[in-house]
């Protein structure tokens, strides 16, 4: 693993894990190894950018918690109540440790490249709050804040418009691996055909 660049950023990654994770993808590709590979490729890139100690995994899944501890990540127990509640728990944990710069990235970006994540964090470093939309402009790939207050969060369908309404600055950056999330077979096949998947995901797909 290459040495991460010095950074003030912490990255919160909510991870559902287990049989309940990636339900849309499982409808056609019910492969627990593949789902875990997508998550772990995403986490590996985040760790390469901000160091493992600045990765915060929010999960209620025992296997994902074990993986995160072994990788040197901070682990926060998912409080329940959905994705936004999990994200808030991760941000609260970072803030309790005295840090300010915190970003939220969902664990479904298997084609994410270190330079892409670094570029997004650098672009948002001078902003109070910001977000990078997903590839179709409807969802949110990354949300970051340098403010001391808890950011208003609206992850879920059509979150990009809601995050813009809540005052987060839109960063429309050309970062295809970051902006392409994988939540069903179609999006996975697109990533496999047009982007560079992480090594665990490629192995799980037999590539």
Image: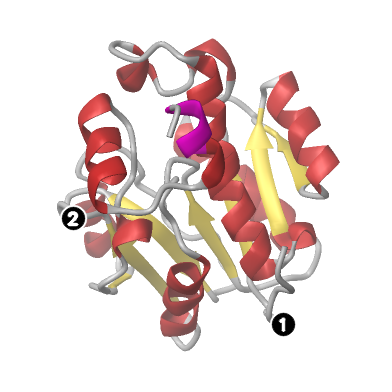
Q: Residue at x 58, y 57 (%)?
A: 45
Image quarter where the C terminus lies is top left
Within 10 angstroms of label 1, few (less than 14), some, or many (20 or more) residues? few
| Residue 61 location (% of width, % of height) | 67, 21
Q: Tell me where residue 116 sits by quadrant.
A: bottom left
| Residue 125 location (% of width, % of height) | 50, 83
In this rendering, would 93 be left or right of 26? right
Q: Is residue 95 above or below residue 29?
A: below
| Residue 179 location (% of width, % of height) | 31, 57
Assign a secondary structure to mark 1: loop
Q: Tell me where residue 183 sits by quadrant.
A: top left
Range drawn in magenta: 201-205
The residue indicated by pointer 1 is 6
20 or 185: nearer the eye? Answer: 185
Q: Inspect the magenta stretch and tell me whether residue 87 lies in it.
A: no
The residues tagged by marks 1 and 2 sit, at their Cα atoms, a distance apart of 32 Å
The residue indicated by pointer 2 is 161
């Amino acid at each position: 693993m290459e040495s991460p660049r010095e950074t003030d950023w912490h990255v919160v990654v909510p991870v559902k894990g287990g049989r309940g994770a990636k339900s849309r993808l499982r409808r056609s590709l019910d492969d627990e190894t593949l789902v875990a590979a997508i998550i772990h490729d995403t986490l590996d890139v985040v760790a390469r950018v901000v160091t493992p100690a600045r990765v915060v995994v929010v999960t209620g899944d025992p296997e994902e918690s074990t993986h995160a501890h072994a990788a040197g990540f901070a682990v926060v127990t998912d409080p329940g109540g959905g994705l936004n509640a999990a994200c808030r728990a991760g941000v609260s944990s970072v803030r309790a440790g005295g840090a300010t710069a915190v970003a939220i990235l969902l664990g479904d970006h298997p084609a994410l490249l270190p330079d892409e994540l670094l570029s997004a964090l650098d672009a948002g470093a001078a902003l109070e709050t910001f977000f990078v939309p997903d590839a179709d402009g409807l969802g949110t790939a990354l949300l970051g804040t340098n403010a001391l207050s808890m950011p208003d969060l609206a992850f879920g369908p059509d979150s990009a418009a809601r995050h813009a309404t809540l005052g987060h600055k839109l960063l429309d950056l050309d970062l295809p691996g970051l902006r392409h999330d994988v939540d069903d077979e179609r999006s996975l096949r697109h990533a496999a055909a047009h982007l560079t998947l992480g090594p665990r995901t490629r192995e799980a797909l037999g590539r």
